[in-house]
Image (cartoon, helix red, strand yellow):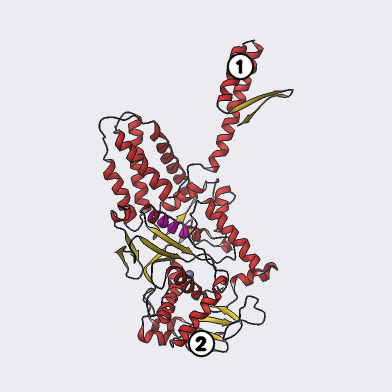
Amino acid sequence: MPLYKQQEIKIYNSLTGEKDVFKPIYEGYVGMYVCGPTVYSNVHLGNVRTFMSFDMIYRYLLHLGFKVRYVRNITDAGHLENDADAGEDRIAKKARLEEIEPMEVVQRYTVDFHNILNAFNFLPPSIEPTATGHIIEQIELIKTIIDNGFAYEVNGSVYFDVLKYNETNNYGILSKRKVEDLIHNTRELDGQSDKKNPQDFALWKKAEPQHIMRWPSPWSDGFPGWHLECTAMSTKYLGEHFDIHGGGMDLKFPHHECEIAQNQAAKGQTPVNYWMHANMLIMNGKKMAKSTGNFILPNEIFSGDNPHITKGFSPSVARFFMLQAHYRSVLDFTNDGLLASEKGFNRLMEAINLLDSLPTSTSSTFNVPEWKQFCYDALNDDFNSPILIAHLFEAAKYINQIKDAKASITKDDLAELKKAIHAFVFDIMGLEELTTTDNKGTNEKLTGTVALLIKLRQEARANKDFALSDQIRDELQDLGIQLKDGKDGTSFSLS
Ligand SMILES: [Zn+2]
């Protein structure tokens, strides 16, 4: 029996405002879409946190035996500066400033994005589609929405008619906003005068002469509105109705609200059963922003090359730190927090390393099956990673007690404990044992130790104690360390 039949997951659903029992549309299969990055600069740590939350969710669903199709897009066109329908395309602007092709911008920051996610040990999504690769699908969607009477064309641009839509549907169903309030909240109409109403949003924008990213369409040479790409790509790969749609909290409105409206207007049904939103990451209690200097790039966490941290941290420590907060809580990124997480991470890894050498007994002083279910319960409760970690620390404490002969475990329980810990720590949380920052310290210690042994060997030779000098050389050889005698002294290499 697959694990998912034994575990009942509850997901906090932004649509209902409640923790809903997760029931996939097709038993055993999950379709999940997450809004990916706009690749016009180095990936923001806040985005990494969002994607990490969904990486853990993806890993957990896989662990339970679901067949998951996980789609996470790359926005490489259509995302304008102010998140609305005005301003310059973010990628085109960067290309203009740096005097390179827009697709060079896209390539550079897509590579950066993948490198960072690889460093953090993310699983790649099943499909990673791009907005520019789906212009035809987006044009087709616009045609359908116009045919259904929910969009209109003005001067080569096409806008979604929010008020018309709202007559028969609920615009604001996700963000819990009212259309009337949106009128009052929209201050100026400058540059938006083509729209019938200020709430309307662009499905297609006619390109200005200087705009380089443009495609032909029935309405004009132009480019699609940002919200449209996710509707086109999610339904193309997951069907018109799928299970989970995720993204950062900031995308709930207008982006996800517009996705629902577009889908409803084009296909007559709501696209998604469970809408999930990950909360923000702040630093030292304040919003992270390049302009104020309260900012860190993911790479700088690893190197330590940033004034806000006192040293570098391995990707797994940083990952552990982020998973110590629930994905729906604000996470405050601080040096002290990272230092504390590093200690906790090392404590956990030390306990895991003890698992292979623990003595077993005829009885257990700890209820391993119950503990294991507590770990599942934590994940089943809207993927509560901090509670899971608390249970893992309990297990670490128990492991240390067994080592110190203050507790006991049976052979079967030890096997179960080992298997469960490995699943939770490595498969689901995606942590890795090897830490790059520790390697540096380890290498220094190794070099010092071998240098000491070389010195003792030289003394042994000077005392004509060749048995001892040979023993040192041979036993190092057995450990994979070769000594090489040269005219400048003895050096060593690792095999
Ligand atoms: Zn999106």
**Is residue 267 shown left or right of residue 91?**
left
Mark 1 / mark 2, whichever is N-terminal: 2
Please identify the quarter of the rendering in which residue 407 is found.
Answer: top left
Task: Please tell me which residue lies in front, 334 or 23.
Answer: 23
| Vertical comparison of 296 with 252: above or below | above
Q: Which residues are magenta?
A: 49-60
Q: Secondary structure at mark 2?
A: loop
The CB of the residue at mark 2 lies under 8 Å from ligand 1: no
Q: Secondary structure at mark 1?
A: helix
**Percent from the top left, x then y, of residue 362?**
26, 30
| Vertical comparison of 410 with 203: above or below | above
Distance from disc 1 to disc 2, alpha carbons, whole Å, reads 87 Å
Q: Residue at x 58, y 64 (%)?
A: 291
Whether 454 is among the magenta residues is no
**Is residue 218 shown left or right of residue 72?**
right
Task: Please tell me which residue lies in front, 26 or 394.
Answer: 26
Instruction: State the residue lying farthest toward the right.
Output: 487
**Percent from the top left, x then y, of residue 277?**
41, 65
Instruction: State the residue lying farthest toward the front.
Output: 1
| Vertical comparison of 180 with 39: above or below | below
- Look at label 2 and name its amino acid: Lys
Residue 470 is marked as 1
The residue carrying pointer 2 sits among few (fewer than 14), some (14 to 19) or many (20 or more) residues within 10 Å by Cα, namely: many
Instruction: Say if residue 488 shows up in the picture.
Output: yes
